[in-house]
Amino acid sequence: MKCISVYTKDFEVFSDICEKILELNLGENDETEVDGITVADAGEVPDDYIEKMRQKPEVAVMRIRKQGVIILQHGEVFEILIPTEEDEETEETA
């Protein structure tokens, strides 16, 4: 899954810009600002990353089911995990 880091601890601000972020086409390790908030491509995360993060009590896990997106909130960062074409192919064959 592709990971996009959003550097804010304010959920309201994050929710206001989330759709804009999902529309971005960031290249690997690219960084930009959306409404004054730093947004960066953090590359790919391993398959077990989500499970490891779910087990931590300080991590909030949210989903956008229709898009297959998982959002992790911890500390002063949100991580948006977006399925890649490779992820979707793996699901189809499983």
Image: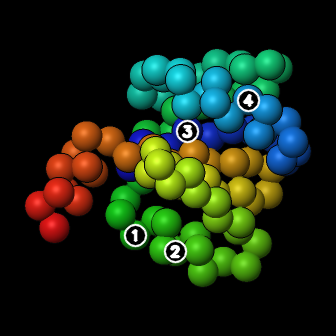
Q: Secondary structure at mark 1?
A: loop
CA gap, disc 3 to disc 2? 18 Å
Left or right of residue 66, residue 39 in this image: right
Residue type, numbered disc 4: Ile
Give percent across and percent down for residue 36.
82, 20
Residue type, numbered disc 2: Lys
Give percent across and percent down for residue 20.
64, 24
Answer with mark 3 or mark 2, whichever residue precedes in sequence. Answer: 3
Residue type, numbered disc 3: Ile
Give percent across and percent down for residue 33.
71, 19
Look at the image and name its color scheme.
rainbow
Q: Is residue 71 above or below residue 85?
A: below
In the displayed image of the protein, which residue is found farthest to the front? 66
Q: Which residue is mark 3?
A: 4
Which image quarter is the C terminus in? Answer: bottom left
CA gap, disc 4 to disc 2? 26 Å
Q: Is residue 4 above or below residue 61?
A: above
CA gap, disc 2 to disc 1? 6 Å
Q: Which residue is mark 2?
A: 52
Q: Which residue is mark 4?
A: 17
Q: Secondary structure at mark 2?
A: helix
Answer with mark 4 or mark 2, whichever residue precedes in sequence. Answer: 4
Q: Are marks 2 and 1 in contact (CB under 8 Å)?
A: yes
Answer with mark 3 or mark 1, whichever residue precedes in sequence. Answer: 3
Q: Nearer the viewer, mark 4 or mark 2?
A: 4
Q: Secondary structure at mark 3?
A: strand
Answer with mark 4 or mark 1, whichever residue precedes in sequence. Answer: 4
Q: Which residue is mark 1?
A: 48
Q: Is residue 43 above or below residue 87?
A: above
- Residue located at (79% from left, 57% from top): 75
- Residue located at (27% from left, 51% from top): 87
Q: Secondary structure at mark 4?
A: helix
